[in-house]
Image: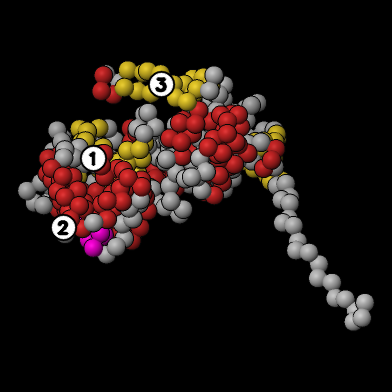
Amino acid sequence: MQRPPLEVADIVRAAGKKFIASSREWITVRHLKVLRAIVSCRTSALGYHVDECTRCGYSGHSYNSCRDRHCPKCQGNARLRWIHGRKKELLPVPYAHIVFTVPRPLAKLALQNKQLIYAMLLRLSAETLIEVAHNPKRLGAEIGFFSVLHTWTQQLEHHPHVHCVVPAGGLSFDHQHWVPANPRFFLPKWVLRKVFRGKVKDALNQAFAEGKIGFYGKLQHLSDPKVFAAFIRDLYRKEWVVYCKRPFGGPEHVLKYLGRYIHRVAISNHRLVSFDNGEVTFSWRDRAHGNVQRNMALPTEEFLRRFLLHMLPKGFVRIRSFGFLANRHRRTLLPRCFHCLESAPDPSTTEPQPADTSGLWKCPQCGGPMIVILRVFLPRPLPRPPPAVHVWAQGS
């Protein structure tokens, strides 16, 4: 893919210092670390590596990546590696795409309690799918699926939601046959919405009773039990949107579909249009009006603020597997799924791949895969040592 003319790194280099100086009230060391990584990514500051073609032997060098998961330039390789690892787990059945969203007031609370509420949304959306699918009136089977947390809208506003990609069917309770879903829909969205809303309500009340929720700034008034109870009642009355797409194609379509949601950041460099006169212009899709592409201009400081809104808590896992695809069940139940479907994983997907194959870099001469044969890291400056302790002779 051709390198875009404008990158987030260019904006940080030009306006980063001014932005940091004006954001001292809320910016943290982790924010600074992300900005520093984005600026240094694929520059001489991080050293370089030597690549060699596995076919013709051509060699060349490239600058190292920062590997920060918030960097727009570092997610392509991670996405390809993840998708390649999932190929052998895709079943020869249609797949459904389900999205769980939350009302805006809860999104504001989630921004102050990311670790707690993000994990809650992933866990409760999975429990909702498993519980509804387990009901004999709906599907009556054990399902498995991937879940991915996204926290942004096309306009970079904070909007946490969970994408789930689910095989349209599941294993029977005795694990002896495959139960296919209705070809017109996977599970009724009104049932999913009702169950999910109730689970979130109960989880929030329990977290509040255990003192796990923090309230800051404009939300401090919610720390009062009566006010929080009223907040939950109002939240329960609001519309909770659960989007269910009709089951689509098989494994080959799923791989392309997953590429849209896996290892993504709030905005890609290819969406940046211009950076001029203290404003950043980027493209976005207006899904409310026929998915029309429009441009939006934001002041530079507001653009960087919105970009950093979507920084995840340290160590947070935003891509998770559940049901028969969960780590503790995958080894035993996934082969049962293939057996019941009278199929088997594609043998080409189980072949070992070179550990250093990037997947993105192809040989400019023959198009073969390039592997890393040498990495060179620049030495980091050591911290300044403490002053030496002098022992003065007695009487001096």
Determine the main secondary structure of the stretch shown in magenta.
Answer: helix
Badge 3 vs badge 1, beta-carbon distance below 8 Å: no
Residue 323 located within the stretch drawn in magenta? no
User: Disc 2 designates what residue?
Assistant: 173
Characterize the local packing of mark 3: few (<14), some (14-19) or many (20 or more) Cα atoms within 10 angstroms. few
Badge 2 vs badge 3, beta-carbon distance below 8 Å: no
- Visible in this render: residue 164? no
The extreme right residue here reads: 396
The secondary element bearing badge 2 is classed as loop
Residue 273, percent across and down? 49, 20
Q: Mark 2 or mark 3, which is nearer to you?
A: 3
Point out which mark residue 296 bears.
3
Query: Label 2, label 3: how many angstroms apart (C-alpha)?
Result: 51 Å
At x 55%, y 39%, the residue is 20
Residue 62, percent across and down? 67, 36
At x 27%, y 51%, the residue is 221
First in sequence: mark 2 or mark 3?
A: 2
- Give the residues in magenta: 205-209
Amino acid type, residue under disc 3 in the picture = Met
Amino acid type, residue under disc 2 in the picture = Phe
User: Disc 1 designates what residue?
Assistant: 103
Q: In which quarter of the image is residue 356?
A: top right
Residue 12, percent across and down? 57, 33
First in sequence: mark 2 or mark 1?
A: 1
At x 49%, y 31%, the residue is 301
At x 29%, y 62%, the residue is 211
Of 117 and 23, the residue lying toward us? 23
